[in-house]
Structures are given as C-alpha cells and as structure tokens.
Amino acid sequence: AFQHRLGIVRSAGDAQIEVLARSHISFRDGRALFKNRQVSASEPLLSSAARGLRDSKSPFAMQAEYFAANAVFEQNRMGDAEKTLRRLLTEVPPRYQALGALIKWELALCLIGRARWGDAIPVLEESIATFERMNEKGNAAIVREILAQSYDAIGDPETGWRHHLIALQEL
C-alpha cells in the first residue's frame, strides 16, 4: 500500500501534488473538527478532501469519504450517509479490510437509525467477523454490543444476551 501511494506522489505533477497536499490538510482539519463535535463544520472539509483525493487517484480518498459519511450521519442525514457507504463497500479493495469493517459498522448504524434493525444484523456480523480476523478485539466487542442491542430490538433477547456476554469477554 505504501509503495502504491509513493508511486502516486512520484508520478504527480506540481498541480496534482498541490491538490493532494490541500486535500490532506482539509482531511486533518475536518477530522479535528469532527473530534471536537463540530460535525457540521467538519463535513465540508472532509467532503472537499475526499473529492481532491479521489480526483488525484489517491487510495486515501475512501477513508476521507468514510469520515465525510460519518459527518453526514451525525447530522441525521442517514439516507445520504447510507448511499455513500454502500458505494464505498463496492469500491474498497480486499486489502483494506479494516476500512471495510468500519464502513459496515457505520452502515449498520444508518440502518438502525432508520429502525431497520433486522437489516443491520448481517452487516454487523460481517463487521465483527472482519475485526476478529484482524484480531481487533476492541472494535469487535463494540460492534458486537450493537449487534446485541439489535437482537434485543427485534425481540430476541436470548441471542442479544449471548452477544452481550461475548462482548464483555472480549473487552
């Protein structure tokens, strides 16, 4: 992955390098705003970063788009966020497993936010499976807790409770 990114920079002209640099700065600033709960201010920066990175053929564009979708979700525009996340799922290469798992996690939250608990369950299970394969126990436990709540919401407290217990053991 590093060699691929390095190749993009080495083959870029001055104008493209400027776009890449501006896009990374926008991403950094957008993430800082998002972290400080200034979500509506973060979205334009994250979206701008995503566009610039995508136009520059940077593989980092997908991560910027993922965070932009998070900002959209946090503003209760779940349909828009879901659309972006579904598109990203079709584009994310297998080598970016962690990003794929994060996208599925956020997609599941979009579904849950629209009371589509049953639709969220298989998406959450896929996210958990990826995190577990990568030995990311903390993320797996957090997503498993959301899965447990989803089972509770659809009226299957026994399965929900089983997942609550597994999540606690993973933490």
Image (cartoon, helix red, strand yellow):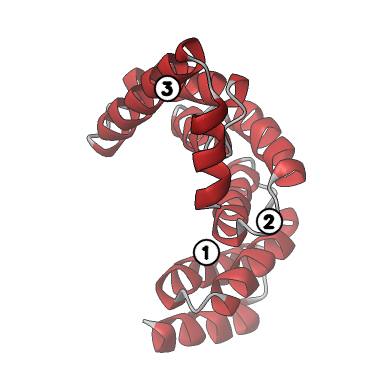
Observer able to see residue 109: no
Q: Nearer the viewer, mark 1 or mark 3?
A: 3
Which residue is found at the position 62% from the left and 64% from the top?
127
Q: Amino acid at mark 2?
A: Ala
Q: Which residue is mark 1?
A: 146
Check disc 1: other Cα within 10 Å, few if <14, some if 14-19, many if 20+.
many
Q: Which residue is mark 3?
A: 23
Q: What is the x, y in percent for residue 109?
A: 56, 48
Q: What is the x, y in percent for residue 123?
A: 69, 59
Given the current orientation, which residue lies at the most extreme left position?
A: 36
Q: Secondary structure at mark 2?
A: helix
State the mark number for residue 120. Answer: 2
Which residue is found at the position 31% from the left and 31% from the top?
28
Spatial separation of the CA atoms under disc 2 and disc 3: 32 Å
Answer with mark 1 or mark 2, whichever residue precedes in sequence. Answer: 2
- Whether label 1 touches label 2, CB < 8 Å: yes
Spatial separation of the CA atoms under disc 1 and disc 2: 10 Å
From this view, report whether residue 99 is shown above or below residue 139.
Answer: above
**Quadrant in which the C terminus is drawn:** bottom left
Observer able to see residue 45: yes
Left or right of 73 on screen, residue 38: left
Which of the pair 47/160 is nearer the observer? 47
Which of the pair 73/91 is nearer the observer? 91
Left or right of 8 on screen, residue 45: left
Q: Nearer the viewer, mark 2 or mark 3?
A: 3
